Image: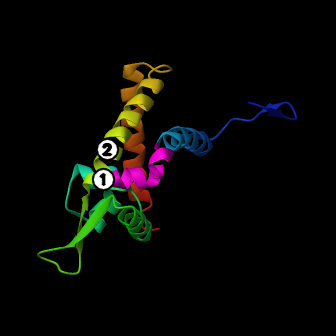
Amino acid sequence: MPTKAGQEIIPTLGFTMGVTYRKLSMYLQHRLKPFDITPEQWSVLLEVDSAEGLIQKEIAERTSKDHPTTTRILDQLESKGLVYKQKGKQDRRSYLVFSTDKAKPIIEAGKGYEQEMRSELLECVTEQEYEVMMELLHRIDHHFSGVNKDF
């Protein structure tokens, strides 16, 4: 890392995670571009498809997005014909969200891209290191979910 006045600058965890996130996101964004969806939209579409009939609140929780962002993304996916909403049977104010047949090829391709990214990661870390990294990231995520709950 570059030095300032002879002192080594040590990158922070947040900086390193942010840079790495952007590189991984760019990898996925490039592959999803022909389908006209972003990595953010992809994460929502994948959750909708994995558990058909979720309400918006559940989708927001599963994707760690706030409610306005989830609403915006669902509206975008709906306008592209990739999801549809159906009024809830028990709570008419809520909508159940489902993926469409048009979304299926995109979902399959996206899952393949996720697998490609995992394989690419395994070019620079071992399977065991990958598992440890994922465990640590989940633990950090869980911890900061509690720390940030009042924000």
Q: Position of residue 122 (x, y in %)?
A: 44, 22
What coloring was used for the rendering?
Answer: rainbow
Q: Residue at x 42, y 18 (%)?
A: 126
Disc 2: which residue:
105
Disc 2 residue type (three-letter) = Pro
Q: Is 6 above or below relative to 33?
A: above
Q: Which residue is mark 1?
A: 102
Secondary structure category for the residue under label 1: helix
Residue 35 vs residue 149, the one in the foreground: 35
Q: How many numbered markers are drawn?
A: 2
**Residue 55's x, y, as percent?**
24, 66
> Is 118 rendered above or below residue 27?
above
Residue 137 falls in image quadrant: top left
Q: Residues within 10 Å of mark 2 (few under 14, many from 20)?
A: few
Q: Are marks 1 and 2 in contact (CB under 8 Å)?
A: yes
- Residue 84 on image: x %, y %: 27, 65
Examine the residues drawn in magenta and state their main secondary structure: helix
Which stretch appears magenta?
A: 32-45
The amino acid marked with disc number 1 is Lys
Q: Nearer the viewer, residue 114 or 22?
A: 114
* Left or right position of 22 against 9: left
- Of the 4 image quadrants, the one containing the N terminus is top right
